Amino acid sequence: MAIPVLMPRQGQSVESCIMGQWYKSVGEEVSEGDLLFSYETDKASFEEEAKADGILLAAFFEEGDEVPVLTNVAVIGKEGESTDEFAPGNEGASVVKEDEPEQEKKDEESSKVIEFDVEETDEERRIRISPLAKNMAEKMGVNVQSLKGSGPRGRIIARDVEVAAQKAGEVVATPKAATPEPVQPAVKPAAPKVLQTGADFEVKSIPNIRKLIASAMHQSLQNSAQLTHHLSADARQILKLRKKYKKEYADGNVSQNVTINDLVCFAVIRALEKFPQVNTHYLGDKMKWFKKVHLGLAVDTERGLMVPALQNADDLSITGLSYQLQQLATQARNGNVNPDLLSPEAATFTVSNLGNYGVEIFTPVINLPQTAILGVCTIIPRPKQIEDGVYAFVPMIGLSLTYDHQALDGGEATRFLAEIKDQIENLSV
Amino acid sequence: MPKNQFINPDEVRKSKQLEFNPIPVNQYNKTIEQEKENFTKEDFLRIFNDMVVIREFETMLNLIKTRGEYNEVPYNHPGPAHLSIGQEAAAVGMAYTLDVEDFIFGSHRSHGEILAKGLSAIAKLDDETLEKIMETHFDGVTLAPVKAGHTGTTKELAVKFLLYGTLAEVFARETGFNKGLGGSMHAFFTPFGVYPNNAIVGGSGDISVGAALFKKVNRKKGIVVANIGDASMGCGPVWEGLTFATMDQFRTLWDDDMKGGLPLIINIVNNQYGMGGQTCGETMGYEVAARIGAGLNKDQMHAERVDGYNPLAVIDAYRRKKKIIDEKRGPVLLDVLTYRYSGHSPSDASSYRSKEEVEAWESQDSIVWFGNELVNAGIATKEELEQIKSETESLITSTLKLAIDDDVSPRMDMKKYPNLIGEMMFSDQSVDRMEDREPEVNHPMEENPRVQQLTKKERFMFDANGKPHSKIKTYALRDGIFEAIVDRFYKDPTLIAYGEENRDWGGAFAVYRGLTEALPYHRLFNSPISEGAIVGTAIGYAMCGGRVIPEIMYCDFLGRAGDEVFNQLPKWQAMSGNVLKMPVVIRVSVGSKYGAQHSQDWTALAAHIPGLKVVFPASPYDAKGLMNAALQGTDPVVFFESQRIYDIGEMFHEEGVPEGYYEIPIGEPDVKKAGSDVTILTIGATLYRAMDAAKILEEKYNLSAEVIDARSLVPFNYDTVIESIKKTGRIVISGDASARGSFMRDLASNITELAFDYLDAPPVVVGSRNWITPAHELEDYFFPQPEWIVDAIHERILPLAGYSPENDFTEEEQLDRNAKGI
């Protein structure tokens, strides 16, 4: 019997994915484990493997289509098997089928594919469904788009989902028994398509992640009152510590090569513990105060900027912190980070380090709803009075704190920044 | 309706005419020389001093309100300040003779009375008691600011304490007498005998009667004075209070030493205006308020008018009237004539009276006049009086400075403790008896005929074969209520119960049958048909420390006790800063069969008001357990009972209704029947119709219904209901109240918010129609029927195969009914 291939759900917050490249074409033979297609979520790209042997009988979407998660995207089965009942918008429609002439049905089907254009579905197809039925459908993997409701006024109710799930042969024991799906490795996004070519330019499509970053950054600047304070901290202590760790790592005494960035993050976490008002989300009419520090780390990747969150960063030692940050950055670069950790809500505060690139001052953009972000700049020797009348060049590390003035006042922000400076200058680990 | 009082037609039909005694008006005519034998110089100066203190206190408030400063101390007080400048002699004269254990109740214009009674109490209390009072009030929080740096005597400290506690209260400071929760119109301090003042005109008119009832029933020393205005004589509850206070039965029917009138003085502080309405000549017809006494009882309430501009005249009247009360010939009505120069409130432009009138009264100012009298009679020198005035001014100035200092006198920290007021709404105590002494009863409980009869009843509705016992043999819901109440009567000596037809008749629905035999008159009696006073007196009774069960015969009569149930009963615990407890259980019987004004379920009205607990049991087991819980608590409980099921037996609790004591916690709904497909949540007697609906669903449509009885409305634990919805995903809420604005709607809205993700359809409310209740024969078209519940499930939740509904529960119909307002 033919089985459908679902668009997987990557993380609880993901509602739809963008279809990537098809690695198999319709009619081709596939074996379990073969790569079928790639797809993108908000922040990462993934590949889906075939879960059964057979022929790829149908592929319902093309590259670039936005596909709600848990929707059928393809069918694998034996040659000659019908795939109609799996077509999105057509599941369980076998009763209707008999009454209609073959030709008509085919027409309808082909037009349906076009209807699945991203922009229109949300607006035009308002589905009446009870909250319970909706939750059950998500957990049972039933596509509600196609369901006919048996409740009052055609509302899709729980029993409709149960019936559909039974039909699809995918009965899940209880609606609550959903388990988190394993995170799959991502692939590089497809190269941008050239949309238009002119004499001296090309118009190219932009990948989904670029659109998302664009929207998040624009929203941040539109919806908050952000401004940036700069100051610099005496970096002698962290340089000393860095030197010590470097040596110990080289000597094999510690397992972790603790970096300047790790040390700065460690100092920031200590400062956040003293300033809980910064370790917050600003929610318009209220503030969400976190008891733990979930530290967002801006990571530059091939796919674009990613900010994975390190949960409970305040529980970690300096080596633990260093290890975890390294892991997280690697996962982000490889694209196999848990998408839930990429949500701006996952972090309580973010650090963005451009020191390596020699940036002296910058104005990082807040990852809303967080209330602030710290930009870490390069270390520059600056003249400093070290005793009365005696000046020397001291390595100073630049710190740029952007904060949402809606949530914090200048005084608070300055005191917090000064606290980071203080922590950096007197860091003990 | 006692049988021993024979109404002889030959007597009552005789021709005769009523004679009235003359009512004295301003008869006091002693000179200050003559009064020298009754007052020492110290006494005279105390009277003068107390008037000056009140005048200066209110002058300060007036300046703060109108100019924003007093003696160069600036302050903005946005709240109320109803001043009584000009009325000082009336207040001091009233309070002068009162003992500490005499209680006064007042109005929105009672700063003067608080201070006069407080100063009077301070003069009478010894230092040790005073210190204890001050140090124990809120653990010394009110005392601390005035104690710091105090060097004088304890009595001087107590005066500072009184002024400060009152002013801090006016300014809503946490250090005030009631934590700032009462404010200007409600401030009081019970250790000095100052009981709640009331912002509702005439509000004290029935509450004070209940306080006097408490004194009488519990043999407490002291009298009760109700300071109410001349205009409050136009208020229904005041008349009801007067009627209640003058009931014949106190003298004719109450037993032995209980015989005799209430220790109560209705003290009409007659400043001749009700806000701007002139009571004599415009808004009332009595001409002289003392005339009212003649209409109330044969003693004419010993009414007289007294010149309230002469403190000695008022004191003289109080000395004479207290004697009448000592002889158990109360209550007394006094019409104390006075005048206020200040406006009703600072916004009053005095457009209703002439400048000449105010000036004429000012020229006879009682403080100036009394001072001159003292000087002329050689009792005091001008210098002595001036000294009193200047000392008072500096006392008031320093009190003001303390009371507005945010560090010394902070407001409640609602930012740090956002639930502070919430925690004060209920006292939530568990108290067996309000006082520790032997309850007065007529015989041991086991000898009571009703108690004996109940031992023979079947405490579960069905026999071993599942067949119901005969009605007469079945222990019914009314028996459950009775058992809880009789038990408490034998436990708590302060417990009393009253209402219409409570004694002899045993209540209109026989709940109290047997209680008449068990209890002396003063613990169970018939009230006048005065729902306002029935509840109002209960409030006064509870404020003083007693437990009480007032009864409202039909829920429809609750409106008659509107102010008492909605404004007084729920609020005094919190408004007192938790000084007062309110162990009042109002029994309210919800009718049927008797049409539009005898069949309404008004649970939503009670549930809407913050500060009331609301229960509505529907089974004998729940009725007894919830009544036990209500009577064990210290909070006001509105206890709804349905007349439709007074005789129903216990069909849920299979062990039957226990003979012993048990409590069912207020606020816990109960699953009466488990099920898996749909939940039906009911309020009150509709439980049984929901059970019938469940049967239809099960037998005809293979749908398993879970039936939950709300039992309580406030508080309400939603966990049970949400757990049920997690199982069923569907819910109908039903009860006998008209659906619009009902508590069912509140349940539905909370359930939608709290269980949204589990719902397979919106919660549907099946309530009564938004009509008048029709005659019994048409009631099935008005109250929810089992079929309605099935119809609603079919049309709004889960269409049932092959079902055709009888009633229209469609969205169109709902829209249409709402659009029409029906």
Image (spheres, coloured by chain):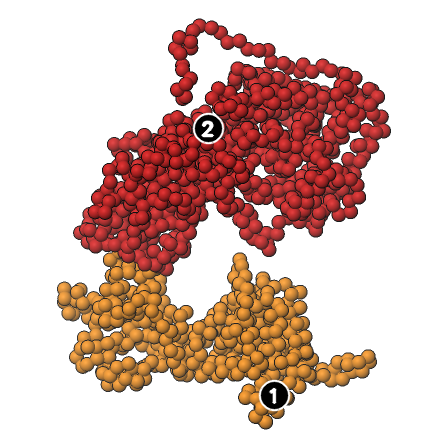
Q: Nearer the viewer, residue B340 or B480?
A: B480
From this view, report whether residue A86 is shown above or below residue B115: below
- Residue A370, x across and y down, in percent: 54, 68
Q: Amino acid at mark 2?
A: Pro
The residue that label 2 is drawn on is B520
> Which residue is nearer to you in this view: B395 or B458?
B458
Quadrant of the snapshot with the C terminus of chain A: bottom right
Question: Is residue B334 something that shows in the picture?
Answer: no
Which chain's colour is orange? A
Residue at image position (66%, 32%) is B100
What chain does mark 1 sit on? A
Residue of label 1: A245
Type of amino acid under label 1: Tyr
Marks 1 and 2, how far apart at CA: 91 Å
Q: Position of residue B459 (x, y in %)?
A: 31, 42
Shown colour of chain B: red
Image quadrant containing the N terminus of chain A: bottom left
Q: Quadrant of residue B592?
A: top left
In the visual, does B176 lie left or right of B770?
Answer: right
Identified at 26% across, 64% down, the residue is: A162
- Element type at marker 1? helix
Coordinates of residue B387 in the picture (x, y in percent) = 83, 32
- Badge 1 and badge 2 in a common chain: no
Q: Is residue A333 visible?
A: yes
Q: Is residue B778 above or below residue A365?
A: above
Q: Residue furthest bottom?
A: A251
Residue shown at 57% from the left, 11% from the top = B21
Residue that appears at 33% across and 60% down: A132
| Rendered position, B563 above or below A262 | above
Crowding at dot 1, Cα within 10 Å, few <14 / some 14-19 / many 20+, comes out as many
Where disc 2 sits, the SS reads: loop
